[in-house]
Image: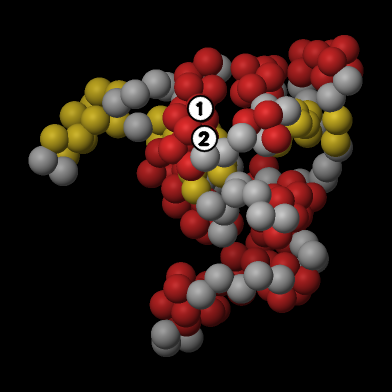
């Protein structure tokens, strides 16, 4: 997660929580492992994570993939599967990305958004009239949130309370996200 978390932007998290507050589920979608995607989703209080699955037998990883590699067209296949299972209307859904490699995912939804896009994605986003957003990295706010989390978990039953109860707004204001 060290490579994913520092790349987050406060504005991205704010947008995600605004989607949740409007009743839209939020998923993190990554080519990384499904387990990592789910762990990150729990950490950020998203509704779920979609990642590359690995085959297991008797609780042991075999080293073989199970399902699509969640990258490019494989990402759209995994998203379609979750959307079908959860009854999500993709034409009313949003997707955010910074990379041209996510064009299949962005074209899958009705509301594609390019965030700090690479040059290839920026060119396509401009040509297709997609929204383009520019953000600054989370940096100091993430370090503060991590320190606050560590202190909370050291406080006896704080770990259970943090994992069990999902505060909706107050903590976001304290770290400048809402």
Look at mark 2 in the image and give the residue it sits on: 83
The front one of 109 and 4 is 109
The relative height of residue 43 versus residue 87 in the rendered view (above or below) is below
The relative height of residue 74 versus residue 15 in the rendered view (above or below) is above
Label 2 crowding class (10 Å Cα cut-off): few <14, some 14-19, many 20+? some
Asked if one can make out residue 98 in the rendered structure from this viewpoint, the answer is no
Q: Quadrant of the C terminus?
A: bottom right
Asked if one can make out residue 64 in the rendered structure from this viewpoint, the answer is yes
Does 154 sit left or right of 178 as displayed? left
Image quadrant of residue 121?
Answer: top right
Q: Secondary structure at mark 2?
A: helix
- Look at 68% across and 19% down and name the residue there: 107
Tell whether label 2 touches label 1 (CB within 8 Å).
yes
- Look at 77% across and 71% down and name the residue there: 173
Q: Position of residue 158 (x, y in %)?
A: 47, 82
- Look at 30% across and 24% down and name the residue there: 65
């Amino acid at each position: 997660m060290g490579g994913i978390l520092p790349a987050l932007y406060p504005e991205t998290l704010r947008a995600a929580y605004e989607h949740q507050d409007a009743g839209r589920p939020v998923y993190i979608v990554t080519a990384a492992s499904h387990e990592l995607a789910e762990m990150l989703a729990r950490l950020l209080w998203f509704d779920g994570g979609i990642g590359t699955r690995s085959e297991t037998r008797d609780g042991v990883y075999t080293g073989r993939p199970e399902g699509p590699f969640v990258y490019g067209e494989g990402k759209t296949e995994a998203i379609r599967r979750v959307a079908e299972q959860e009854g999500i209307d993709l034409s009313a859904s949003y997707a955010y990305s910074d990379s041209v490699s996510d064009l299949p995912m962005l074209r899958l939804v009705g509301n594609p958004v390019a965030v700090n896009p690479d040059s290839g994605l920026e060119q396509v986003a401009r040509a297709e009239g997609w929204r383009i957003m520019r953000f600054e990295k989370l940096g100091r706010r993430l370090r503060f949130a991590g320190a606050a989390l560590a202190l909370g978990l050291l406080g006896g039953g704080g770990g259970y309370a943090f994992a069990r109860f999902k505060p909706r707004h107050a903590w976001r204001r304290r770290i400048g996200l809402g």
